[in-house]
Image (spheres, rainbow, N blue to C red):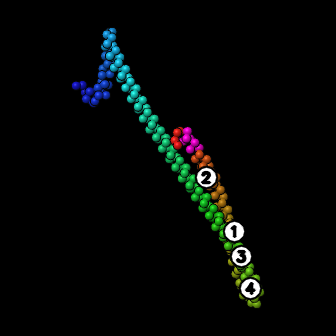
Amino acid sequence: MHPAWEGGRSTAHDYLADEARGFRERYRGELPGRERLFLEEVLRLANDKRRRRRRFVTAVIAALSLLVLSAMAHVMMIQKIQEYQEKEGQRDEAEAARREAEEASKRAEHEAVLAREAEEAVRQNNGQELEQCTSTEARVRAEIDAKHARVAAAKARDDEAKARKAVERAQQSKRQWKELNDWNWIWGER
């Protein structure tokens, strides 16, 4: 048996097709009808097999390419989702900081009012020295609280500006996400 036949049936067919091609190239004369038809059929079958094999390899490569593209698109979508979630978290943190600053400002205003009321009550009492100490202390405490409130309000404004920027980035990310989904729909991924 020929070594090419040991690999199996497809190898034997390849061997026969190669032999038929070689015979056709070597033989210069005219073949009888039956032999000529046999030779043409063997060569046609070999060419069909080659064509099928090429189509199969091309289809496999195309399918793998589509899988890679799909995986890349999914990775990009996951990254966009994570970015969007991070921006949402930043916006929530900025909103919480703004609320906290507002509350601190309200507390400072309330303490200033209490200090004024205490100062007024002390004035109505007979002890002048006690009045001065208490009112000075209350006034200093109110001034400190007012400064804290101003700092907290400034921080809240900064946080609010950061939150606006985060919202803008989130909206941009959302637009990009929609565009990516539109492309996925066009590619046939739903």
How far separated are the C-alphas under marks 4 and 1?
28 Å
29 with respect to 65 (left or right): left
Q: In the structure shown, which secondary structural element does the residue marked by tag 4 occupy? A: helix
Q: Which residue is mark 2?
A: 170
Q: Which residue is mark 4?
A: 122
| Between marks 2 and 3 in the image, the one whose residue lies nearer the viewer | 2
Say above or below: 172 vs 146.
Answer: above
| Between marks 2 and 1 in the image, the one whose residue lies nearer the viewer | 2
Q: Residue at x 51, y 44 (%)?
A: 73
In the rendered image, residue 114, in percent from the top left (x then y), is placed at 71, 78
Q: Are marks 4 and 1 in contact (CB under 8 Å)?
A: no
Say above or below: 114 vs 1.
Answer: below
Q: Which residue is mark 3?
A: 112
Q: What mark, if any, has residue 150 been given in the picture? A: 1
Asked where in the image residue 160 lies, by quadrant, the reply is: bottom right
Q: Residue at x 60, y 60 (%)?
A: 92
| Tag 2: amino acid | Ala
Q: Are marks 3 and 4 in contact (CB under 8 Å)?
A: no
Q: Residue 28, can we see it?
A: no
How far separated are the C-alphas under marks 4 and 2?
55 Å
Density class for disc 1 (Cα within 10 Å; few <14, some 14-19, many ≥20) is: some
Mark nearer the N terminus (4 vs 1)? 4
Density class for disc 2 (Cα within 10 Å; few <14, some 14-19, many ≥20) is: many
| Tag 4: amino acid | Val
Mark nearer the N terminus (4 vs 2)? 4
Q: Which residue is most to the front?
A: 190
132 with respect to 24 (left or right): right
| Membership of 87 in magenta stretch | no
Mark nearer the N terminus (3 vs 4)? 3
Q: Which residues are magenta?
A: 179-186
How far separated are the C-alphas under marks 2 and 3?
40 Å
In the rendered image, residue 174, in percent from the top left (x then y), is placed at 60, 49
